[in-house]
Every structure is written in structure tokens, then in C-alpha cells.
Image: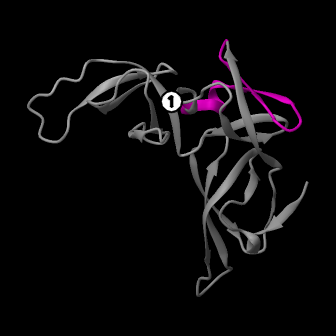
Amino acid sequence: MATVTTNAFKPGLKLLIDGEPCSIVATEFVKPGKGQAFNRVRMRKLRDGRMRDRTFRSGEHVTLAEVVELELQYVYSEAGHWFFMDSKSYEQYTADAAAVGDAAKWLVEQSSIQATLWNGGIIAVSLPAAVTLAVRGTAPGVRGDTVSGGSKEAVLQTGTTVRVPLFVEPGERIRISTRTGEYLGREKA
């Protein structure tokens, strides 16, 4: 396996720490007045997204995590597993609920996602910042005593419920933020 020294640390670098793939979020080189220099590193575990802090001695060798980032197409889900396909090689990959996480609320068949693969399996799924989904149903919009434009609940084609403005009707396609679940606007024609 390939190794790297601490002087090559930078945000985005993938390391293998205690058998877990991690991505460096921030790194700080510290040279105290007395003693050996060291690197203070903040990392995110790629499997579960938890943050972790660790200190490395200057010049220490660390193993690189052999992870691959691929753009895949969502095909279908069944019995707690999600199936994805590489559009170029037609190779199929399977992900479990831990790897897909909250992205499951926004996945529509044939949508593109960014997958992180480690040891041949998907460990994380990333969506674009916003997705366009069809509104399956909403309550009728009733104007009332609203100070700042009212909102109502809408059920999307994925079954997820979000808050939308009163003017949104069933059948319309709307843009939703995948990070916050907020309504961003109608689909541009």
C-alpha cells in the first residue's frame, strides 16, 4: 500500500486510519518553541461521516486509503439495498442503508450520484446540491392570516414530504435542496 508523509497532508487527502478510510478536512502544522513539530489533523470517517481529530509527528508515514470516486446511475432498490450502475462499463454496485443514508429520500430511478468505493463496495453516496422532483400531492392552498407568504406540505414522487409555497400544485416539478430539504423553486422550462 502507498504511504505519504505528514508534510503532504492537505484537505481532501484520503488516509487509512485504524483500518477505516478517512478524508482530511483541515490540517495545521504546529512548531512549538520546544520539542518536535507536529500536524494537528481534523478528519471525516468516510463510512459514517463522523469527525475525528488526531495528531501526527512531523515526518510520520501514513497509509493512503485506496478509495475510488465514481459517477453512478441509480437503478432500483429492494429489501434494504440500493443498486447502482456505471454508465460506461455497465458494472453494477450494491449499497446498504448505512452507505446511502439520507440520500434515499431524494433518489429517483436513473438519477446520477457520486459514489465512494472502498474494497470494491460503496461506502458513501453523495447527491448534487439540488434535485428536481415531481409533486405527487398537496393540500389545497388557502390564503389566510399569513405575514410572510404561506406554505403547505407536499408529497414528492419519492414519498418524501416537504414544505412548499401555496401556489405549488400536484404534477409540477420543483427543485429541492438535498442538504436542507428546502424548496428552491419550480423547474425551469
Task: Tell me the element at label 1.
Answer: strand
Q: Quadrant of residue 39?
A: bottom right
In the rendered image, the vertical position of residue 32 relative to residue 120, given as above or below:
below
Please report the residue visible at 8 percent of the width from the left and 31 percent of the height from the top: 145
| Residue 179 falls inside the magenta stretch | no
- Residue 109 in the image: x percent, y percent? 65, 24
Which residue lies most toward the front here?
189
Frontmost residue, 57 versus 86: 86
In the rendered image, the vertical position of residue 75 relative to residue 16, given as above or below:
above
In the rendered image, the vertical position of residue 54 relative to residue 72, given as above or below:
below
Q: Quadrant of residue 82?
A: top right
Q: Quadrant of residue 92?
A: top right
- Residue 90 in the image: x percent, y percent? 87, 31
- Residue 157 in the image: x percent, y percent? 50, 21
Residue 170 placement, left or right of 143:
right
Q: Which residues are magenta?
A: 79-102
Q: How many marks?
A: 1
Residue 2 placement, left or right of 150:
right
Please report the residue visible at 67 percent of the width from the left and 44 percent of the height from the top: 46
Residue 110 placement, left or right of 183:
right
Residue where numbered disc 1 is placed: 133
Amino acid type of the residue that numbered disc 1 sits on in the rendered structure = Leu
Which residue lies most toward the top here?
79
Q: Which quadrant is home to the N terminus?
A: bottom right
